[in-house]
Amino acid sequence: MSQRVLYCHCAYARVVPEAVKQEVLAGLAASNLEFEAVPDMCEMSARRDARLAEWVDSGDALQIAACYPRAIKWLFSAAGVTLPEERVRILNMRESPASDIVTSILEAKS
Amino acid sequence: MSVQVVLYEGSGSQPLEPAERGAMMRALLEKGYPVESVRARGVANLSPGAATVVLGKFDGPLPQAEALHFRDLDGTATPDILAAIDSVREAASLPQPGKWKPWFPVIDYKRCTNCMQCLSFCLFDVYGVAKDGKIQVQNQTNCKTECPACSRVCPEVAILFPKYKHGPIHGGEVNADDMRREAMKVDISALLGGDIYSALRDRSIKAKSRFSKERDEDRALKERMNCLNKLQKEMDIPAEVFAALPSVDEIRAKADAAKRKAEAALAEKAQS
């Protein structure tokens, strides 16, 4: 199963530590990974952005660097998209160190 | 829908330095544009019909393709790149990103019991009822930024605000202590008179009564301010929300209408 890496920048609030966001984004950008970065998944949910369904419908395993898993799960649900828990991993930038998140994504991808 | 940006480093283009790649992605995100980093594989996951800008250091002349807008990063300053993407967005009549802070409630349906208290409580018509009789967040943009008040009245801690600073409202897991704490907060509001709106109503009536008896305008105003300040602190509600509250009569009418709506939805669901 191919994997897709997604990064949420939570651009319109200061709840994700700035240093963590910077380090995770820089870490992903410095790797050989292809990934998608979005400004704000809350905004995508409110607008029922078609991209959310496209990610899930792709059948890829999803690694999402964002915030609390419960929040992400129900944000997708609010947009009418059910996250398939068996192939989704949510990494919480509000709680986990940036280095752990980057390492975890890179290890899963390799 | 937003402009889709692809940072292309596949065949026919030069790779970017990691710092340059990171800085460009950050600049795009800060401006509200999603960006996909495409490397050696050279394949982007394009959304059908999306206005798409492809950025890269292309070898030779810029590629041409229908519905794709290519821009060369070589020798172009970041503000000029961002301005070029703005132009594509404007030409596609897409809204400017970042105009609205996405602050709204999100329902954890695993916890929600469909009690409809949030529907009855919210005065800004954020909640509604879906065709299947379930409570639903219908008007996200009506929600008052930074106000998590409806999550306070939810007896099941089923309402999240992902951008809230504290748990479990921010989406962290709910534990037994959280349940006790949230229940206490509801009890506090109950002690004030059943709910926050009836508290406001009662205070208003009392203040009016005192005013008529004592003709003490200053005292009545001070009393009301104290009540509002207390509620504001206890429930972490921004002052702007109180300032935006409708009149007492309007509150009563809205609350009654919401109650009828909730009762009708629950009755319909019970019959089906």
Image: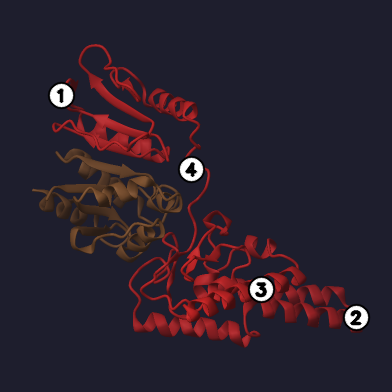
Chain colours: A brown, B red
Of badges 1 and 3, nearer the viewer stands 3
Q: State which chain disc 2 sits on.
A: B
Q: Earlier in the sequence, mark 1 or mark 3?
A: 1
- Along the polypeptide, which appears first: circle 3 or circle 4? 4
Can residue B121 be seen in this snapshot? yes
Q: Secondary structure at mark 4?
A: loop
Residue B5: percent from the left, percent from the top?
A: 33, 33
Instruction: Read off the residue under disc 1.
Output: B11
**Label 2 environment density (alpha carbons within 10 Å; few <14, some 14–19, many ≥20):** few
Of residues B91 and A91, which is closer to you in this image?
A: B91
Q: Residue at x 20, y 51 (%)?
A: A59
- Ranked by sequence position, the earlier of labels 1 and 2 is 1
Q: Nearer the viewer, mark 3 or mark 4?
A: 3
Question: Disc 1 or disc 2, which is closer to the eye?
Answer: 1
Residue B212 is tagged as: 2
Between B241 and B90, the one nearer to me in the picture: B90
Q: Secondary structure at mark 1?
A: loop
**Which circle, 4 or 1, is nearer the viewer?**
1
In this rendering, position of residue B249 left or right of residue B265: right
Disc assigned to residue B255: 3
> Which residue is drawn at the image coordinates 33% and 38% (left, top)?
B26
- Residue B33, given in percent of the width and then of the height, sits at 39, 38
Residues beneath discs 3 and 4 located on the same chain: yes
Chain bearing mark 3: B
